[in-house]
């Protein structure tokens, strides 16, 4: 009888260093970088808030490796999804070493270090999140904008934008 198991890692954190993109002998791309995640808690017996930082080694392969190497930079906030993997290797000094890393199969750039500034957006984009410039406006926003453009200038009525009320 076989028992099911699960090896799944979901991380949201900031890159601790620029990605290192390399190629294997047969031409397969491999990209490695680090992510820092934070955990904050208050002790049950009271006291000051505590914080701990965890550092994770991330590895991407093939096309995802090329993408990571091109768009990621130190300080970027990313979502990574993958699996834990432990591997043995021999160091330059001949010593046997073991490392645990997260091999990812999905990555989403949440915010770039340059994208965090609201100064980079014009008035039409002030309600968008960083990195969303290329995405089309939602249908509700398009309809509201069309109604505003079609309305006579002296008869303009305020259209309530409910898109910001979505709780996520």
Image: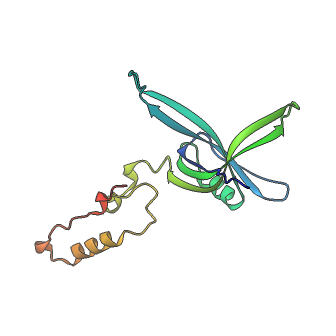
Task: State the image coordinates of residue 82 (x, y, percent, origin top left).
Answer: 63, 52
Instruction: State the residue at coordinates (32%, 59%).
Output: 166
Task: State the image coordinates of residue 142 (x, y, percent, origin top left).
Answer: 32, 73
Q: How is the image coloured?
A: rainbow
Instruction: State the residue at coordinates (37%, 55%).
Output: 168
Q: In which quarter of the image is residue 47?
A: top left
Q: In this view, does 19 lie to the left or right of 79?
A: right
Task: State the image coordinates of residue 138 (x, y, percent, origin top left).
Answer: 36, 69
Q: In this view, does 110 lie to the left or right of 18?
A: left
Looking at this view, name the residue that lies furthest to the left.
154
**Which is nearer the eye, 159 or 149?**
159
Instruction: State the residue at coordinates (43%, 25%).
Output: 43
Please, is residue 142 above or below residue 126 in the view? below
**Which is nearer the eye, 47 or 36?**
47
Task: State the image coordinates of residue 38 (x, y, percent, origin top left).
Answer: 51, 36
| Quadrant location, the N terminus | bottom right
**Which is nearer the eye, 24 or 51?**
51
Looking at this view, name the residue that lies furthest to the front.
1
Please, is residue 65 above or below residue 100 in the view? below
Q: Quadrant of residue 23?
A: bottom right
| Viewer can see residue 20 | no
| Viewer can see residue 155 | yes
Instruction: State the residue at coordinates (30%, 58%).
Output: 164
Q: Is residue 138 left or right of residue 10?
A: left
Tell me how many marks there are. 0
């Amino acid at each position: 009888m076989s028992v099911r198991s699960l090896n799944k890692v979901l991380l949201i954190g900031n890159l601790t260093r620029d990605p290192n993109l390399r190629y294997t002998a047969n031409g397969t791309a491999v990209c490695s970088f680090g992510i820092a995640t934070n955990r904050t808690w208050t002790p049950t017996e009271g006291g000051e808030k505590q914080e701990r930082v965890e550092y994770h080694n991330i590895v991407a392969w093939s096309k995802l490796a090329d993408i990571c190497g091109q768009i990621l930079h130190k300080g970027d906030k990313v979502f990574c999804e993958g699996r834990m993997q432990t591997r043995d290797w021999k160091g330059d000094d001949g010593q046997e070493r073991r490392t645990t890393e997260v091999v990812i199969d999905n990555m989403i750039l949440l915010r770039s270090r340059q994208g965090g500034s609201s100064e980079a957006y014009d008035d039409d984009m002030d309600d968008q999140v960083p990195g969303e410039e290329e995405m089309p406006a939602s249908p509700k926003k398009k309809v509201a904008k069309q109604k505003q453009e079609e309305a006579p200038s002296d008869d303009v009525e305020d259209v309530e934008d409910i898109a910001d009320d979505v709780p996520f």
